[in-house]
Amino acid sequence: MGDQRRTSSGATFGAAHAGGVVVPTEVAHEAAAAGASPRSFAREVETGLKSELTHDLGRSRFRLWFRDVEVVSVEGDTLTLAVPTEVHRSWIEYTFGDEVRRASERVLGRGVKLELRVGVAQGEKRALREKLPQRPDAWERRLLEERPVPTFAAFCAQRHDRWAVTLLEQLVHGGGPSAGPTIYLYGESGCGKTHLLEALASAVQAHAPGECLYLTARRFTAIVAAALRSGTPTALRTLHADLASRRVLLIDAVEALEGRKATQAELVRALDRAALGGPRLVLAGQRHPAEMEGLAPTLASRLVGGPVVRLALPDRALLCEILTARAAACRLAAPAELVEAIVERTRSPHTAMLWLDRWVVASRDLGRPLEAVWLAEIAPPASTSAGEDVIRRAKDRVAEHFGVEVGLLERATKARSAALPRAAALYLVWRSTAMSLTRLARAFGYRSHSSVSRALAGIRSKRTGDAVLEQTLDGLLARL
């Protein structure tokens, strides 16, 4: 976008070029003296112009005709816009010309003449977007089809995590008697638990098809519930026989079993069979079994009967290495500046890898590696990608403000001191994202979406009648 600035008297002056963008000479000198970039001022003008047009035309018409429009320059009384196609140029000029001029006048404080030209970069962006999925569910299908198969080699583990990979590798060919019947992995979201389970499942499946079963805890719960609802012993016997026929059983996100007594009882039976020579179990969760108040003591004690390995989140350098290796597994070379841009713009390994996977899809569709400046075109929406980031930040902010531990915000507890902070963190995430109530329930340890709905109704009611709480929540929300 062009960079333009006026003096206090409203006059404009001759232009100089800065980085391919036309910038008034006095503005360039003033920005240089102040240590500011004229381009940053141009972005502010662009933001104001697009905001005015969105208000005047409505969101749907704005996205259809102005999403890829950029300002090239503001020279004297002429505003030059770059549009993606000749159709855009004609339609904007003859249909929206007056609206653009009025919006520009409100932003710049004076009237301007409108000049439109077709821009190469704008056309390329539009062409790329037409090739890419637009809906989150379509993106998910593409990513499932094209993401690389997880492997142990791609884990890029820190040295103290490497022995966990060694334990799992022993299970591929039926070895590892010293590891015991169970292995439990735990750590924060993004540390690589699911990657290791999927890598083990893939390796066992390739070596001995049908001998490994990989389930999330919620899927395991659904299977057990279906067998119990049938009301016949045959359904449970069939379930037990299926589990016993496997050599390796993998269960992810064990924290979802908290409070589910029937499912926990079935898992205890599976663990007892493993101790007697049955299927080897590998389980993963975000917390140590001893920290899960909703687990029965019999289950918690069995989960720590074998190796318990804590996986650490990768630091910045290691995350860059992981992203580079992930791109290489897709036969693409990710430039260092691209990897750095992804890490800089994301706040968790999970989100960074989601951006990298989208970059792989876009690069293949484009026929060449996508430049870092185009990352915004493939950035996942907040409702799908930034959810984990928002949850993490909300918990940290609330825990700091109320002086409680973050762990108290993640599970059901009878501690009265945790009730309001937990509801406050839930409210902040609900306001900041489009996450479903079911996903919110998993994030904050509620039993179901109904429990989340009641908690949100309660905190909203308290907020309405308590000015101090309202101010507190608004302040925390602004900090997110």
Image: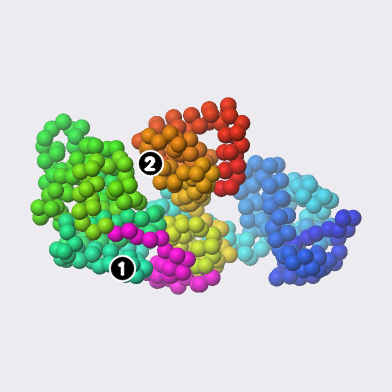
- Give the residue pinned by disc 1: 162
List x then y, in percent, for residue 121: 62, 64
Structural crowding at the residue carrying mark 2, measured as other residues with C-alpha within 10 Å and reported as few (<14), some (14–19) or many (≥20): many
Q: Quadrant of residue 469?
A: top right
Q: Secondary structure at mark 2?
A: loop
The three-letter code of the residue at mark 2 reads Arg
Q: CA distance from mark 1 to mark 2?
A: 30 Å
| Residue 445, image x, y percentages | 38, 40
Identify the mark at residue 411; answer none if there is no mark.
2
Q: Quadrant of the N terminus?
A: bottom right
Query: In screen coordinates, is 463 left or right of 43?
Result: left
Asked if one can make out residue 358 in the rendered structure from this viewpoint, the answer is no
Q: Residue furthest right?
A: 9
Going 62% across and 43% down the picture, which residue do you hit?
A: 59
Q: Give the residue displayed 13% in from the left and 32% down from the top.
A: 232
Q: Residue at x 83, y 58 (%)?
A: 6
Q: Is residue 245 magenta?
A: no
Find the magenta span and give its range.
Answer: 309-338
Across and down, in percent, residue 205 comes to 21, 60
